[in-house]
Amino acid sequence: MRRVVYAASFVDDADRIAQYIEAQFGAARADVFIDDLNRFCELIASQPRLGKRNHGYDTMLHGVVHDRNWIFFQYDDAEARFLHIVDGRRNKSLIAF
């Protein structure tokens, strides 16, 4: 199984989302989001071909949808590197990688 690696940019993005969830719905819901995100990333690391590159964002990274967010990653035989998580409701042309 590939090792899961979270880039600092991914952690920052996930923390921002969790802070928003906490402000709106409470700390317990934010904890559920982070736990679910970690499990989801582990699943993607085991089957990275689930990601796609024709997602409409200006990047060649693989992308996959998690809830309302797009997760962007790259992988090789040894690891899956999760680089960004962005709100899928935002205008794609405004997202810079």
Image (cartoon, grey):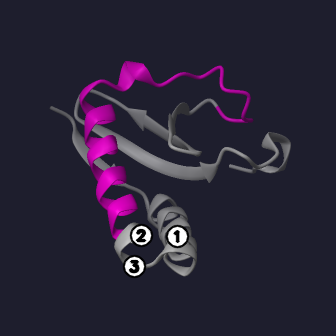
> Where in the figure is residue 27, as x and y percent of width and height?
39, 79
Q: Earlier in the sequence, mark 3 or mark 1?
A: 1
Indicate the secondary structure of the residue bearing disc 2.
helix
Magenta-highlighted residues = 31-59
Which quadrant holds the N terminus?
top left
Q: Which residue is mark 2?
A: 30
For this view, does 39 lie left or right of residue 20? left
Q: Is residue 77 above or below residue 36?
A: above
Which residue does the image show at 82% across and 45% down from the upper left? 91
For this view, does 4 lie left or right of residue 53? left
Q: Is residue 57 above or below residue 47?
A: below
Q: CA distance from mark 2 to mark 1?
A: 5 Å
Indicate the secondary structure of the residue bearing disc 1.
helix
Which residue does the image show at 41% across and 69% down from the upper left? 30
Indicate yes or no whether the magenta region holds residue 41.
Answer: yes
Q: Which residue is mark 1?
A: 21
Which residue does the image show at 65% across and 20% down from the upper left? 54
Asked if disc 2 and disc 3 are in contact, CB closer than 8 Å, the reply is: yes
Q: Earlier in the sequence, mark 2 or mark 1?
A: 1
Decide whether the magenta segment is chiefly helix, strand or loop.
Answer: helix
Which residue does the image show at 47% across and 25% down from the upper left? 51
Asked if disc 2 and disc 1 are in contact, CB closer than 8 Å, the reply is: yes
Q: Which residue is mark 3?
A: 27
Which of the 4 image quarters holds residue 8? bottom left
Q: Is residue 57 above or below residue 35?
A: above
> Where in the figure is residue 33, as x and y percent of width and height?
39, 59
